[in-house]
Image (cartoon, grey):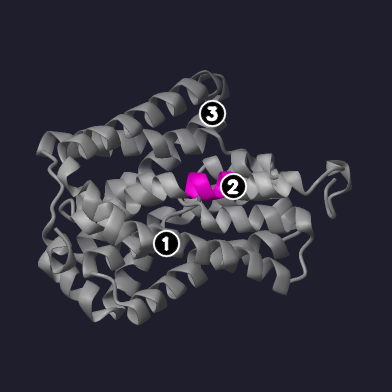
Amino acid sequence: MAGAAIDDILLNISPGGQMALGIVLALIMYGVALDLRVADFVDVFRRPAAPLAGLAAQLILLPAVTWAITMVLKPQPSIALGMMVVAACPGGNISNLITHMARGNTALSVSMTGISSLLASVTTPLNILFWAGLNPQTAALLRQVSVDPVSFIGSTVLLLGVPMVAGLLTVRHLPGLADRLRRPLQILSFVFLIGFILAATITNWRYVSVFSTSVLPFVVLHNAIAVALGWGVAKILGLSDYDTRALTIEVSMHNSGLGLALILTQFDGLGGAALVAAGWGVWHLVSGWALAAWWKRRDPHPERIEGAA
């Protein structure tokens, strides 16, 4: 099954499954909030150039570039929509680990992840609706799956914003409880999400060949462009190698689990889009690890990395 037929794929998910996925997503965002500290954001105000440039690249430039890619290469509409959804998602916590592996500025990575996650309840739905609306094919697809902009923004704010605020309040007023919940909740959320992805993959195994031929090339290209965008912005601004590594990884690693959840709950499980988000979830780990390994291999004397404290 290839060509236009990929737009007709709808991944099977029951109403109960959608509810369960919504709960898992809320737990993930709550867990993200439990990991945030005021200290994580102090560096943004002390040295704002790097984090603000990174956030601009992540939240503004990448969605715009993604729209341009879809207009030039003209992938199937559902694939284009999936690319836009992933580009609109905030950074994922795994980017902090990859940045640390790459001997980059982990504090910068953490602050960017935290801020983009805090803004996600607004920036993610607005970016999706704005850029998808500018592409005639994805705009038609949004109408086809009956996405109401007001309802979509409202439900996304509730789905992402409420657990995020709840997590921040827990950290502020119940720090002991936050410390006890943080690690097990994050592990549990991750396990549930991986389990859900595996279950969905097994249930829809017949579409794996479609992914490898029609979707994977766009996932690889899209991620490579995100890497180049993050690196390019850092170089244009003359940032240190220490900051460049963090910014490059942060711009190229997104919370694709959030994107997949939104596609399954808000876009009727649109197959091409879901395959893009799931593919990103795997591929950005591969590319991020490879990039970190390459940078680490370049550093016989890691204490001498330019800009490192």
Q: Which label is found at residue 87?
A: 1
Identified at 34% across, 77% down, the residue is 73
Q: Is residue 280 above or below residue 196?
A: below
Which amino acid type is shown beneath numbered disc 1? Ala
- Horizontal and vertical percent position of residue 65: 46, 74
Q: Which label is found at residue 244?
A: none
For the residues labelled 3 and 2, the Cα–Cα distance comes to: 40 Å
Which amino acid type is shown beneath numbered disc 3? His
Q: Which of marks 3 and 2 is nearer the N terminus?
A: 3
Left or right side of 195 for 207: left
Foreground: disc 3 or disc 2: 2
- Horizontal and vertical percent position of residue 203: 16, 37
Q: Are marks 2 and 1 in contact (CB under 8 Å)?
A: no
**Label 1 Cα crowd, 10 Å radius (few <14 / some 14-19 / many 20+):** many
Foreground: disc 2 or disc 1: 2
Identified at 39% across, 24% down, the residue is 188
Q: Main secondary structure of the magenta part?
A: helix
Circle 2 is placed at which residue position? 290
Q: Which label is found at residue 173?
A: 3
Give the quadrant of residue 213: bottom left
Residue 240 drawn in magenta? no
For the residues labelled 1 and 3, the Cα–Cα distance comes to: 34 Å
- Horizontal and vertical percent position of residue 224: 51, 62
- Horizontal and vertical percent position of residue 99: 65, 45
Q: In which quarter of the image is the N terminus?
A: bottom left
Per the rendered image, the range of residues in magenta is: 284-290
